[in-house]
């Protein structure tokens, strides 16, 4: 399915000179991964603490873009400079889920938004990523199928943050947008399971 994730190779090409400089200065993939997660949690806590004001939500779209860059950078450091490790694999998956949750949940405090809707979308996002990680357990690769993968969620919540901060998106409208995101997450979940099973069948055809 179409996904922003498909633009990743072009984005990586733009970042490659910066990645090389970071490597030359001794920066590791795991350091980048942990830094992105810690900043996401701190920023989420800041937005939640001042959720009665609109302006903190302007930080979310800005950070979502930077975080996508950091996510690409840590992967490139790992793959292109021999920094892949078992610990890195754990950190990459766990930190993404933690960071997403920290950045999504503050929207539950926006006036007019149903908190349960935000929590539901956050849980669905976790389940979708878990389905992607389960690919290798079924004999397939890690699944990144859309239409509501990690990059797509970052874009959607960045738009929501900009809408709240600018006052152009009333809280009462956000519930409907969250329902749409939830539906796309369910679609994504089905795609990842279906495509994972299909890939496993191709890799391991019945005798």
Image: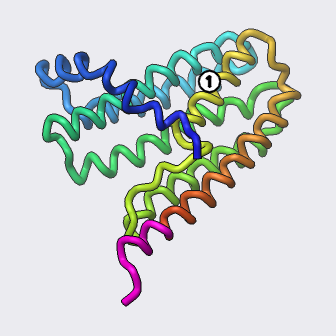
| Range drawn in magenta | 198-207
Q: How many marks?
A: 1
- Position of residue 54 relative to residue 156, above or below, is above
Is 199 contained in the magenta span? yes
Query: Left of 44 or right of it: where is 163?
Result: right
Residue under the image location 49 percent in, 68 percent down = 198
Query: Left of 168 or right of it: where is 160?
Result: left
- Position of residue 121 relative to residue 58, above or below, is below
Is 53 contained in the magenta span? no
Residue 63: x and y in percent read 50, 20
Residue under the image location 60 percent in, 47 percent down = 125
Residue under the image location 71 percent in, 13 percent down = 165
Q: What kind of element bears circle 1?
A: helix
Residue under the image location 58 percent in, 19 percent down = 61
Residue 34: x and y in percent read 34, 34
**Dominant secondary structure, magenta:** helix
> Which scheme is used to colour this image of the protein?
rainbow
Q: Quadrant of residue 16?
A: top left
Residue 29: x and y in percent read 24, 34
Task: Give neighbour class at mark 1: few <14, some 14-19, many 20+ (Cα, 10 Å).
Answer: many
Image quadrant containing the C terminus: bottom left
Closer-to-camera residue (165/196): 196
Q: Which residue is mark 1?
A: 158
Closer-to-camera residue (22/58): 22
Residue 84: x and y in percent read 20, 45
Extreme residue toward the bottom, this view: 207
Q: Quadrant of residue 67?
A: top left
């Amino acid at each position: 399915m179409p996904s922003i994730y498909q633009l990743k190779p072009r984005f990586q090409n733009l970042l490659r000179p910066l990645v090389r400089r970071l490597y030359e200065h001794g920066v590791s993939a795991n350091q980048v991964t942990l830094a992105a997660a810690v900043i996401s949690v701190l920023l989420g806590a800041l937005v939640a603490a001042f959720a009665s004001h609109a302006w903190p939500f302007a930080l979310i779209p800005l950070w979502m873009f930077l975080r996508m860059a950091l996510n690409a950078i840590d992967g490139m450091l790992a793959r292109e400079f021999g920094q892949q490790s078992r610990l890195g694999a754990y950190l990459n998956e766990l930190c993404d889920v933690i960071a997403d949750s920290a950045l999504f949940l503050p929207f539950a405090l926006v006036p007019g938004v149903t908190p349960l809707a935000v929590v539901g979308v956050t849980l669905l996002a976790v389940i979708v990523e878990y389905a992607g990680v389960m690919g290798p357990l079924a004999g397939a690769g890690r699944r990144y199928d859309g239409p509501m993968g990690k990059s797509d969620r970052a874009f959607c919540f960045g738009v929501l943050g900009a809408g709240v901060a600018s006052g152009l998106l009333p809280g009462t409208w956000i519930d409907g947008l969250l329902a749409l995101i939830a539906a796309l997450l369910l679609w994504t979940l089905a795609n990842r399971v279906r495509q994972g099973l299909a890939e496993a069948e191709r890799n391991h055809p019945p005798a």
